[in-house]
Amino acid sequence: MNRLELQKINKHYGKKKHALCDFSFEFTNGIYGLLGPNGAGKSTLMNIISDNLLPDKDGGKILWNGEETRILKEKFRSRLGFMPQQQNLYESMTAHTFLNYIAALKCIDRKTAEQEIPKLFERVELSESMDKKMGGFSGGMKQRVLIASALLGNPNLIILDEPTAGLDPKQRVIIRNMVSDLGKDKIIIISTHIVSDIETIAKEILFIKEGNLIDSGTISALVKKVENGEKSLESLYMQYYGEV
Ligand SMILES: Nc1ncnc2c1ncn2[C@@H]1O[C@H](COP(=O)(O)OP(=O)(O)OP(=O)(O)O)[C@@H](O)[C@H]1O
Ligand SMILES: [Mg+2]
């Protein structure tokens, strides 16, 4: 069982913007949905967990299986697969070359990469396009290349920041099914502001608002908190964030 603990994480941008406020949570194996509107702090949290952004000085601790990630450093990073929200793909590169490049950055040896990459393309249903330049890919295909890149090295912790952003409903379902199949032996954290992306696949949901964890739990426990109307996660989202 893997365990990721966030202990009172704080992050300010400049003096005024308090983007994360005493954010604490414990993740174990399974899929977690991080829900919140634009500007809630989802990407800030994911960038901090993945060590791409530092919290404030004395702004909390992150523990991976009981050890601080900032001490584990590469040992932790090698167990991590991260798909950041905003990414520019190298449009003139083929998808296959791109994954080779990411594998090299992750220090995965060439032979292992050569075995793993075709399997990953199969998994994200891009085998036929893997030798084509990514400039000609649809939004959904690009997102799937990025998911494949996050899966390189068989990580135990997978963080996907809005993998369904900008996709049509059909592509969203494809991505949802892929995430759902990633395996129960890992921690998977996926952010979105679209409830239907995660409500059927997540073990637990975290609601983040203005940098605060305002609620969390299993979907069946959360929907009991709906005050008016249908007992659904969508209704709870409306209750917490107002009309969208
Ligand atoms: N580099 C930065 N400098 C200053 N403020 C920032 C910076 N990055 C984010 N913020 C602010 O911090 C808050 C949280 O931003 P963040 O990107 O984490 O939200 P988010 O939940 O990922 O939003 P979205 O759904 O739009 O991706 C917002 O108010 C944002 O304007
Ligand atoms: Mg974001």
Image: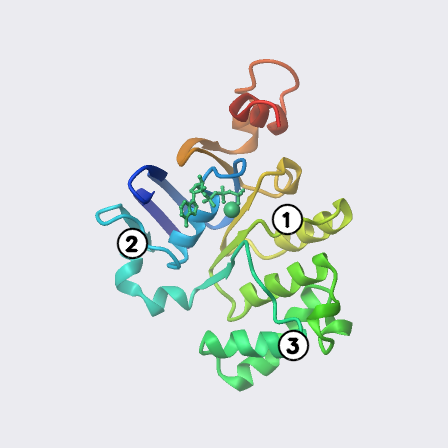
In this rendering, which labeled residue sits more in front, label 3 or label 2? 3
Gap in angstroms between the C-alphas marked 1 and 3? 22 Å
Residue 19 location (% of width, % of height): 38, 40
In this rendering, which labeled residue sits more in front, label 1 or label 2? 1
Q: Amino acid at mark 1?
A: Ala
Q: Is 214 situated above or below 226?
A: below
Q: Is 228 situated above or below 93?
A: above
Callout 3 crowding tier (Cα within 10 Å): few <14, some 14–19, many ≥20: some
Q: Name the residue tied to disc 2.
A: 66
- The numbered dot on residue 165 is 1
Q: Amino acid at mark 3?
A: Met
Q: Of label 1 and label 2, which has the lower sequence position? A: 2
Q: Are marks 1 and 2 in contact (CB under 8 Å)?
A: no
Mark 3 element type: loop
Q: Are marks 3 and 2 in contact (CB under 8 Å)?
A: no
Residue 223 quadrant: top right
Whether residue 141 sits left or right of residue 226 in the image: it is: right
Callout 2 crowding tier (Cα within 10 Å): few <14, some 14–19, many ≥20: few
For the point 34% across and 38% down, the residue is: 18
Q: Of label 1 and label 3, which has the lower sequence position? A: 3
Q: Of label 3 and label 2, which has the lower sequence position? A: 2
Residue 185 location (% of width, % of height): 51, 56
Residue 7 location (% of width, % of height): 30, 43
Q: Quadrant of the N terminus?
A: bottom left
Question: In the depicted view, which residue is nearer to us: 40 or 216?
Answer: 40
Q: Which residue in the rendered view is the most extreme toward the top? A: 228
Residue 68 location (% of width, % of height): 27, 56
Gap in angstroms between the C-alphas marked 1 and 2? 33 Å
Q: Name the residue tied to disc 3.
A: 93
Q: Quadrant of the C terminus?
A: top right
- Evaluate whether residue 86 shows in this view: yes
Q: Does the beta carbon at disc 1 come under 8 Å from ligand 1?
A: no
